[in-house]
Amino acid sequence: MPQHLMRNKRNFLLRGSDGGMQEHAAALLASKGYTALALSYFNVEGLPKNLENIPLEYFQEASTWLKSHPYVNGEINLIGYSRGGELALVLAAAFKDYQSIIAGAPSAYITAGMKNGIFAPVPSWTLHQQTLPYIKFKYRFATMFSILKNMILKKPVSYLSIWDNTLENQEEIAEASIPVENIKAPVMFIAGGDDQLWPSCRYVEMMEGKLENTKRSKQHRYLYYKNAGHFLAFPYSFVNLPANVVMNVGGGMTMTFGGSKVANAKAAKDSWEQILVFLDKNRESSRQS
């Protein structure tokens, strides 16, 4: 591809709660002519083992580096899914480095950190050496009994009931709300109505309400897939492969992430096509401005 076209295509990819690097996602974008940076931020050698107290400045430094890359024109897109979607929104609200943002299956709140792949009562993110407020989980006996029963019976476990308990008191968790109204760039939100890891559809609807009267309201996109689950879109799986519905997460627990292989694959195919349109549209808007 001619170098002058490559300079107008650039993406910054953030992985979810399993950490590591989105190499296949970067490769998929590269196949469409996009310069892509898949950035690890925990669970790889040389970085923290757990998602705990990760400084947002780390991502800002990576953004600055990417902006100065020879194949980049100084503007970058930010793409994240699940915890990476949460992080993308947090970064976009804190910094003005991004031309557009894509948040798949995101949270509307800053969520607690993770230890050994399990949610834990520790901060996820810091800014200026200060921990960002995060929601604290509330567990009811009936909820924990149901989860334990499913584990014993080898049935897939859903986390939705835990979130239902945690989100009951909106005033109590308000300080952990991501200030998406501070984002100065167009955002594409992607959510599945049958997400069983957390209520991403409910989250996106909440954020849509907060953004409907903002300056950029008409530039934001909201993709809702009623029958899809958590793994509904690029870059969790290539669009021609069914995404995972259940997964063994260790300790004898099998989790369900919602949807069906058919519904998730359809959502992945459609969202991937719309992602490309969204990126190209905002690239053209940047050229004209």
Image (spheres, rainbow, N blue to C red):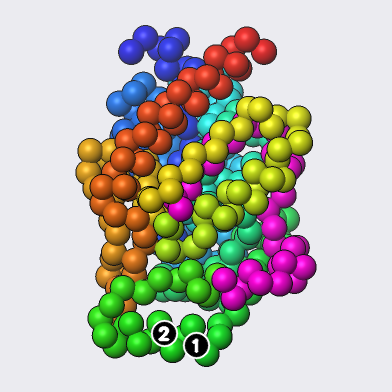
Q: Position of residue 214 (x, y in %)?
A: 76, 35
37 or 208: which is nearer to us?
208
Q: What residue is drawn where x is 56% and y is 22%?
A: 282
Q: Quadrant of the N terminus?
A: top left
Q: Quadrant of the C terminus?
A: top right
Secondary structure of the residue carrying numbered label 1: helix
- The disc labelled 2 sits on which kind of residue? Ser
Residue linked to disc 1: 142
Q: What residue is drawn where x is 34% and y is 70%?
A: 255
Q: Distance of mark 2 from mark 1, alpha carbons?
A: 6 Å
Residue linked to disc 2: 146
Q: Which residues are magenta?
A: 164-193
Asked whether the residues under the numbered discs 2 and 1 touch, taking CB atoms below 8 Å apart as contact, a structural biologist would say yes
Secondary structure of the residue carrying numbered label 2: helix
Residue 46 seen in render: no
Q: Position of residue 103 (x, y in %)?
A: 52, 44
187 or 119: which is nearer to us?
187
Picture layout, residue 73 above or below residue 234: above
Q: What residue is drawn where x is 36% and y is 21%?
A: 33
Whether residue 190 appears in magenta in the rendering, the answer is yes
Q: What residue is drawn where x is 45% and y is 71%?
A: 159
